[in-house]
Image: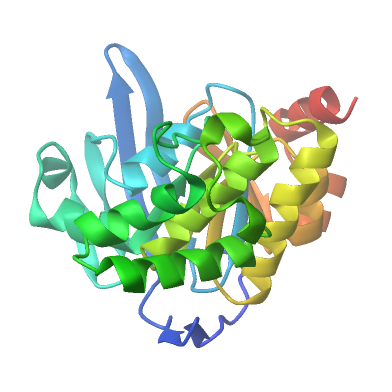
Amino acid sequence: MTDAIQPSPTSYAGRPTGDMRIEVTDLSKRYGGRQVLSGVNLTVVPGETVALIGPSGGGKSTLLRCLNGLNSFDGGSIRVGPHRLTAAESRRPTAAVARVRRLLGMIFQDFQLFPHQTALGNVIEAPMTVLGRGRAESEKRGMALLTRVGLAGHADAYPNQLSGGQKQRVAIARALAMEPRALLCDEITSALDPELKGEVLDVLVDLKRDGLTLLLVTHEIGFARKAADRVIVLADGGIVEEGPPEEIIDRPRTERTKHFLSRVLG
């Protein structure tokens, strides 16, 4: 953890966040003969927004998927709030995986909405089936979340009737419906044109303002500069450097970071 990490808010949406530190210790992951993550150590404090940047194939998305229990890992450990996940536990469906996943919402580049469900149907499906909430309660909460992301007028629309930016905002509302304590966002604007990217990024800025913890894989360097409390450069399976956006983006210390930013920023 660096000096750039700031004191965190005490709550998000009325729920205490003081116990929601995310800690990654000596995390490693292999795909066949390829080492994707190698000894990654990372701490994210409650209410912090962290942007993960770096070249494609550097391990950013794999790190998020390991955090959320979607990928197993080979070594090290992950702690989310009071719950610790070991490498052995990550390889099978355990209670530890379920507890960690319950606290971390995940949003993907390709939306992953149910095509046969309306926007509201997508938002209320998990609270009803996983949390056992009633339909009336779920619909009330779902409409509030769609309003939050600017889509109250599209509750009855199906995914094929929505723009890419609208689909991604439905995906954010769907993740929030499970009342996560942090959101993991994996390149969620990379498939959108500039105007639609702005719609989605504005929602994230609003969530940051409310104190939700955000861990973002992004190539949107401008957004990282504007919204992140800390930028982490991940390349070749390890953290190259980390610090405040103005330091990492404007005054990178390593040649690896300088090379990456020169390619991204032109």
- Name the foreground residue: 67 vs 15: 15
Marks counted in the figure total: 0
Q: Please provide percent x and percent y for residue 210.
A: 62, 77
Q: Say above or below: 22 vs 78.
A: below
The residue at the point 50 percent across, 47 percent down is 119
Q: Please provide percent x and percent y for residue 114.
A: 40, 35
The residue at the point 32 percent across, 36 percent down is 28
Colour scheme of the picture: rainbow
- Name the foreground residue: 71 vs 256: 71
The residue at the point 60 percent across, 36 percent down is 187
In the rendered view, does 265 fall on the left or right side of 109?
right
Instruction: Report if residue 1 is visible in the image.
Output: no
In the rendered view, does 71 fall on the left or right side of 189?
left
Q: Please provide percent x and percent y for residue 216.
A: 58, 48
Q: Say above or below: 92 vs 47.
A: above
Instruction: Report if residue 40 is visible in the image.
Output: yes
On the rendered image, what quadrant is the C terminus found in?
Answer: top right
